[in-house]
């Protein structure tokens, strides 16, 4: 029976750290304590959850064991510390008001897609929340996107302006209810409300009528801007090519693939190939976009994702999306609510100003958004989930430091210039922010600065140092130097290496392959195809053979220029290559200017970039001469594999010894040029290229003899390159590692910068 004597009466204080706020942890502990007849209390604090428990010693031990065994679905305990306190004779157990703390270290949960219980309610005509688009409970709903301050209590969220009605209050205060202390709890009587607006802000309909009006507009091919969980989205019928083209024209997104929101898993299975890992991702409460191989190319318009065999697909991620997609019964394009190069819109008035020339109608609501949170993007690589864009459903879950590390000081890292994100130390964790986009415009820079201020406020964070990229002209680096704090520079590709090590919980020794587009090297040249040996410190030991980029940054926009640089390295007379597509893509006068630039080395910097090598080969194969979006040439080079896995023996590369070993791509380029002359299909030539690069990684691994090999950098977003490299490394007896939770691209740079600084501190490279 509860209360049966099991040893002498004791009282203990318990501090629990981890994901323990907003997940039903306190109700679970409350019910368990009451069941066992224990006295005491529990409350949220800035560090997590703390409680005092009083009762027979055996029951206290049993409580702690059962608590860890019976955690709610989204709770996780990182540490549980107990110490004895004096017994007070307390026999009842209660939940107390939260304890504020000036420097919170509690984990903040990401926003979670609706649980099965809440979905059952919105489809039940007899339930008081029938078709209510803001239903939630402790198992699901908004978290990070509505949170202003910690601890996680209603008054510290954007729900503070919605007083609970009597029925919601009763649920909130009932320990047996799944909405017990669910902070965003609401219903149609007391919660947020939908409205449908025209471009002038005139209210056309409210509540259910607003939802139905938006559905009618989508059926008619109109573009609807919907206020989602973390910002506005544009929705349009994905089957309607003309409507999708209108969205592209108005948004200024000419060719980059658009994401789809599917009505259900059954539709996704008809449109795409879905394995068990992909299915688990789609139905998870993170509810990310998942990159999937197409099965039926005719279920969506060609304009959705031109030139690629994959679709980015997600299932509805909020009750509002569930209701809308259920009513429609067909997929919609669901893309970020912004003009090209701008941040997400969060507020209705702002949306009318910034999005009024794009959207035909606006489906809005009156629950404020605390911070922009975009959709996450994922894929499956060698059977493992890989996060490519870390936002809704994942951010701001922390990445823990290894146990061997001392507690870090408060350090900020500001990341790179593209795919921006920031990172900070919180307790013994690194917290990586949500994806912020490219820092190309003033609005995006303001969003970056607001995110820094918001995170500092949320965690009571006052950094003592700031880490940034070596490149002096990145907006993030300029911000770091203007902060007044000591600045710690981390070379771009080293930051990728440390991001991968943090993600995989790796410590030296190891060999790291850091391949991406471009980053300023410590020698002043443009790196991007680097190999690092980590034996304590991080040392570059190999690189791809450099070639010139005529026009510098212009060559990033025009892969045909990178191709000229590659060809010039083989034969300086470009007229010898006049039969090739990238040479023919220039007018004779342009070609003469570029020939002179390459001959004299004028505005033609050297690069060892693997990303620019991808660009050059894509141009040589006639796939992409000018990028309409970042990485298009590489995407099309991978896409022309058309789902086939390259096989056979890779074209061998040459390794030239020196201070830094040089990996010579010349044998590969000759094989590709022979194939072009012979008229071999692009599919075969792309396979030759991918296989040769994977083989080059194995050759360098053999040269340096490190058993563990880390693959990092934006090039390893390429599913085929990563899987080929993993397979070949394993066949040769190496142990490969690649990114899972921290993006391999520049979205992971901030975490890598921060971890690099902490690793250097540990080995005494700087204080």
Image: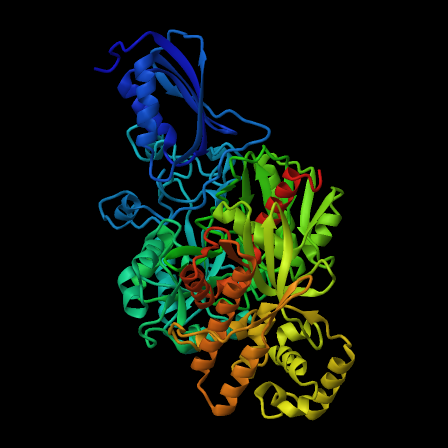
- Above or below residue 704? Residue 217 is below
Q: Is residue 168 visible?
A: yes
The percent position of residue 116, horizontal first and vertical second, equals 28, 46
The percent position of residue 626, horizontal first and vertical second, equals 59, 79
Picture colour scheme: rainbow
Q: Is residue 173 visible?
A: no
What is the quadrant of residue 655 in the picture? bottom right
Quadrant location, the C terminus: top right
- Above or below residue 437? Residue 627 is below
Q: At 60% from the left edge and 85% from the top edge, which residue is drawn?
A: 582
Q: Is residue 347 left or right of residue 92?
A: right
Q: Is residue 221 left or right of residue 340?
A: left
Residue sitting nearer the eye, 203 or 619: 619
Q: At 62% from the left edge and 57% from the top edge, which residue is drawn?
A: 493
The percent position of residue 99, horizontal first and vertical second, equals 51, 24
The percent position of residue 415, horizontal first and vertical second, equals 62, 52
- Above or below residue 677? Residue 661 is above
Q: At 71% from the left edge and 76% from the top edge, which residue is drawn?
A: 551
Q: How many marks?
A: 0
Residue sitting nearer the eye, 639 or 139: 639
What is the quadrant of residue 307 in the picture? bottom left
Quadrant location, the N terminus: top left
Residue sitting nearer the eye, 656 or 406: 656
Q: Is residue 462 left or right of residue 118?
A: right
């Amino acid at each position: 029976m509860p209360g049966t004597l099991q040893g002498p009466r004791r009282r203990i204080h318990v501090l629990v750290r981890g994901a323990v706020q907003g997940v039903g942890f306190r109700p679970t502990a409350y019910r368990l304590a009451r069941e066992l007849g224990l006295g005491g209390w529990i409350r949220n604090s800035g560090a997590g959850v703390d409680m005092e428990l009083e009762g027979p010693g055996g029951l206290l031990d049993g409580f702690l064991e059962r608590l860890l065994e019976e955690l709610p679905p989204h709770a996780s305990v990182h540490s549980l510390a107990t110490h004895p306190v004096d017994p007070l004779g307390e026999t009842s157990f209660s939940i107390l008001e939260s304890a504020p703390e000036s420097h919170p270290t509690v984990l903040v949960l990401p926003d979670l897609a609706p649980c099965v219980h809440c979905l059952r309610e919105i489809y039940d005509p007899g339930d008081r929340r029938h078709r209510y688009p803001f239903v939630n409970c402790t198992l699901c709903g908004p978290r990070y996107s509505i949170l202003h301050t910690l601890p996680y209590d209603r008054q510290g969220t954007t729900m503070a302006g919605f007083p609970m009605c009597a029925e919601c209050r009763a649920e909130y205060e009932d320990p047996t209810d799944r909405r017990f202390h669910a902070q965003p709890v609401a219903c149609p009587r007391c919660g947020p409300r939908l409205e449908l607006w025209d471009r002038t802000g005139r209210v056309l309909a409210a509540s259910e009528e607003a939802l139905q009006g938006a559905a009618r507009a989508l059926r008619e091919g109109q573009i609807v801007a919907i206020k989602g969980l973390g910002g506005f989205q544009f929705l349009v019928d994905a089957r309607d090519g003309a409507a999708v083209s209108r969205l592209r024209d108005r948004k200024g997104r000419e060719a980059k693939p658009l994401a789809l929101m599917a009505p259900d898993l059954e539709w996704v299975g008809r449109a795409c190939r879905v394995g068990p890992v992909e299915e688990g991702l789609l139905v998870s409460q993170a509810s990310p976009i998942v990159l999937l191989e197409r099965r039926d190319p005719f279920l969506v318009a060609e304009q959705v994702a031109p030139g690629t065999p994959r679709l980015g697909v997600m299932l509805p991620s909020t009750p509002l999306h569930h209701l809308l997609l259920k009513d429609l019964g067909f997929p919609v394009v669901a893309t970020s609510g912004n003009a090209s190069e701008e941040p997400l819109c969060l507020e209705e008035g702002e949306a009318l100003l910034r999005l009024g020339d794009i959207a035909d109608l606006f489906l809005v609501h009156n629950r404020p958004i605390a911070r922009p949170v975009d959709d996450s993007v994922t894929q499956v690589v060698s059977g493992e989930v890989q996060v490519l864009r870390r936002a809704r459903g994942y951010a701001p879950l922390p990445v823990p430091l290894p146990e061997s590390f001392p507690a870090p000081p408060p350090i900020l890292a500001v990341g790179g210039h593209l795919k921006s994100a920031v990172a900070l130390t919180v307790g013994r964790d690194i917290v990586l922010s949500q994806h912020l986009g490219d820092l190309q415009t003033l609005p995006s820079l303001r969003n970056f600065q607001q995110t820094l201020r918001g995170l500092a406020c949320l965690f009571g964070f006052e950094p003592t140092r700031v880490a940034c990229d070596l490149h002096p002209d990145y907006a993030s680096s300029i911000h770091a130097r203007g902060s007044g704090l000591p600045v710690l520079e981390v070379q771009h590709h080293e930051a990728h290496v440390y991001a991968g090590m943090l993600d995989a919980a790796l410590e030296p020794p190891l060999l790291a392959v850091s391949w991406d587009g471009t980053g300023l090297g410590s020698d002043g040249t443009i790196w991007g195809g680097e190999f690092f040996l980590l034996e304590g410190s991080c040392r570059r030991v190999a690189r791809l053979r450099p070639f010139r980029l005529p026009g510098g940054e212009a060559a990033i926009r025009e892969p045909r220029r990178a191709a000229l640089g590659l060809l010039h390295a083989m034969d300086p007379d470009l007229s010898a290559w006049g039969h090739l597509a990238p040479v023919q893509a220039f007018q004779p006068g342009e070609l003469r200017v570029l020939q002179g630039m390459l001959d004299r080395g004028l505005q033609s910097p050297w690069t060892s970039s693997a990303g620019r090598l991808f660009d050059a080969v894509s141009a040589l194969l006639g796939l992409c001469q000018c990028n309409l979006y970042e990485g298009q040439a590489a995407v099309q080079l991978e896409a022309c594999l058309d789902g086939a896995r390259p096989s056979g023996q890779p074209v061998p590369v040459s390794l030239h010894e020196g201070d830094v070993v040089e990996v010579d791509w010349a044998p590969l380029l000759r094989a590709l040029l022979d194939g072009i002359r012979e008229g071999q299909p692009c599919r075969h030539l792309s396979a030759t290229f991918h296989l040769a690069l994977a083989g080059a990684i194995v050759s360098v691994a053999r040269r340096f003899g490190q058993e563990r090999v880390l693959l990092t950098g934006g090039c390893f977003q390429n599913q085929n390159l990563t899987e080929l490299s993993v397979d070949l490394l394993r066949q040769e007896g190496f142990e490969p590692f690649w990114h899972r939770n921290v993006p391999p691209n520049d979205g992971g740079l901030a975490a890598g910068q921060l971890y690099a600084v902490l690793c250097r501190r540990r080995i005494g490279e700087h204080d």
